[in-house]
């Protein structure tokens, strides 16, 4: 009988906070399913995921492969005790062999994944962003809704639309010490192009949050007009470290769009208390780029 692992089991194996594992499952970075609203993971799928990540695959691609293989199983092997299909819609049945939360000591395979970093839920991302802006926030949309829309006081943009992502340093895909966000728009599917919503007279902000350092990153959203599903956007570790030391850090990135001229992006990173100042600077830098300065 297939063993079922809980968030606690996975967190112990990966040496991560349970909320980080929960966020990874919600973002399809682990192959899970829900039972009565609680995430569960098949042990065999977790073992396969560890192997794929250990050899350099990204968590997202490893998860996609595992789910695709499970969906191709015949009814004889894809029983009710193996509801990987429920990774999209919650299951309502009791799972046979469900772990009761004991420490997960028996999972063989590669050693603990050391390069995964803390993640928070989308609602918590938005809450931290709003808290960092403090009294400058007049009103905002529902915390769990993405993107977050804000009305702000001057000198901040009066109407803002924020696309906020976890900035992580996962195993595989990026050099050690480099953080990234992955651009996936609400409703966007693999193979589809994504765009930021520029309507409603709102200023668009593309932001990341490095939870372990309590640092926000602000890219130039205007340079990402059209992008593939799960596009990576990076920031150097030293930029995060500089911001964590209590200052607004700048980093230049050379972008080479497929259908345009190469350009230099200036991104910003800042500690949470300096987010308001960083947004103002982000707006100034974007205006200067548009003016050709």
Image (spheres, rainbow, N blue to C red):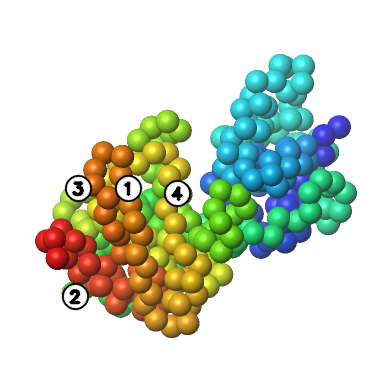
Q: In the figure, residue 82 lies in which quadrant?
A: top right
117 vs 191, left or right, is: right
Image quarter of the C terminus = bottom left
Structural distance between the alpha carbons of marks 3 and 1: 26 Å
Mark 3: few/some/many CA within 10 Å (<14, 14-19, 20+):
few
The residue that disc 1 covers is 256
Which residue is drawn at the image coordinates 35% and 41% (left, top)?
Answer: 227
Distance between the alpha carbons at the discs numbered 2 and 4: 31 Å
Whether tag 2 and tag 4 are in contact, CB under 8 A, the answer is no
Mark 1, Cα crowd under 10 Å, few <14 / some 14-19 / many 20+, is few
Q: Which of marks 1 and 4 is in front?
A: 1
| Distance in Å between CA atoms under marks 2 and 3 | 21 Å
Instruction: Report the Cα–Cα distance between label 1 and label 2.
Output: 32 Å
Quarter assignment of residue 50? top right
Q: Earlier in the sequence, mark 2 or mark 4?
A: 2
Looking at the image, is 122 positioned above or below residue 109? below
Instruction: Report the Cα–Cα distance between label 4 and label 3.
Output: 24 Å
Of badges 1 and 2, the one in the foreground is 1
Tell me the element at label 1: loop
Residue 167 visible here: yes
Q: Residue furthest bottom?
A: 246
In what element is the residue under mark 2?
A: loop
Q: Can residue 120 be seen in this view?
A: no
Residue drawn where x is 73% and y is 38% of the image? 48
The circle on residue 145 is none
Residue tagged by mark 4?
A: 232
Task: Residue under label 3, please give it.
Answer: 199
Q: In this view, does 5 lie to the left or right of 242?
A: right
Cα–Cα span, label 1 and label 4: 14 Å
Residue drawn at x 83%, y 53% as measured from the top left: 104
Residue 155, which numbered label? 2
């Amino acid at each position: 009988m297939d063993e079922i692992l809980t968030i606690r089991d996975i967190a112990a194996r990966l040496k991560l906070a349970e909320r980080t594992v929960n966020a990874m499952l919600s973002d399809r970075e682990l192959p899970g399913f829900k039972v009565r609203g609680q995430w569960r993971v098949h042990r065999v799928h977790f073992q396969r995921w560890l192997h794929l990540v250990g050899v350099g695959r990204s968590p997202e691609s490893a998860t996609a492969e595992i789910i695709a293989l499970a969906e191709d199983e015949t009814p004889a092997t894809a029983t009710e005790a193996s509801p990987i299909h429920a990774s999209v819609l919650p299951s309502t049945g009791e799972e046979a062999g469900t772990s009761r939360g004991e420490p997960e000591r028996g999972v063989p395979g590669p050693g603990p994944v050391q390069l995964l970093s803390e993640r928070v839920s989308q609602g918590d991302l938005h809450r931290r962003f709003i808290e960092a802006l403090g009294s400058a926030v007049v009103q905002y949309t529902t915390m769990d809704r993405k993107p977050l829309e804000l009305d702000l006081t001057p000198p901040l943009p009066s109407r803002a639309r924020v696309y906020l992502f976890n900035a992580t340093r996962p195993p595989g895909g990026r050099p050690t010490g480099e953080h990234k966000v992955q651009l996936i728009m609400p409703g966007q599917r693999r193979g589809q192009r994504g765009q930021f919503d520029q309507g409603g007279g709102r200023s668009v902000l593309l932001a990341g949050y490095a939870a372990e350092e309590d640092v926000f990153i602000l890219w130039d959203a205007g340079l990402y007009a059209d992008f593939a599903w799960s596009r990576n956007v990076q920031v150097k570790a030293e930029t995060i470290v500089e911001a964590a030391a209590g200052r607004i850090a700048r980093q230049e990135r050379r972008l080479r769009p497929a259908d345009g001229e190469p350009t230099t992006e200036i991104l910003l990173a800042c500690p949470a208390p300096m987010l308001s100042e960083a947004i103002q600077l982000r707006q100034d830098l974007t205006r200067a780029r548009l003016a050709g300065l």
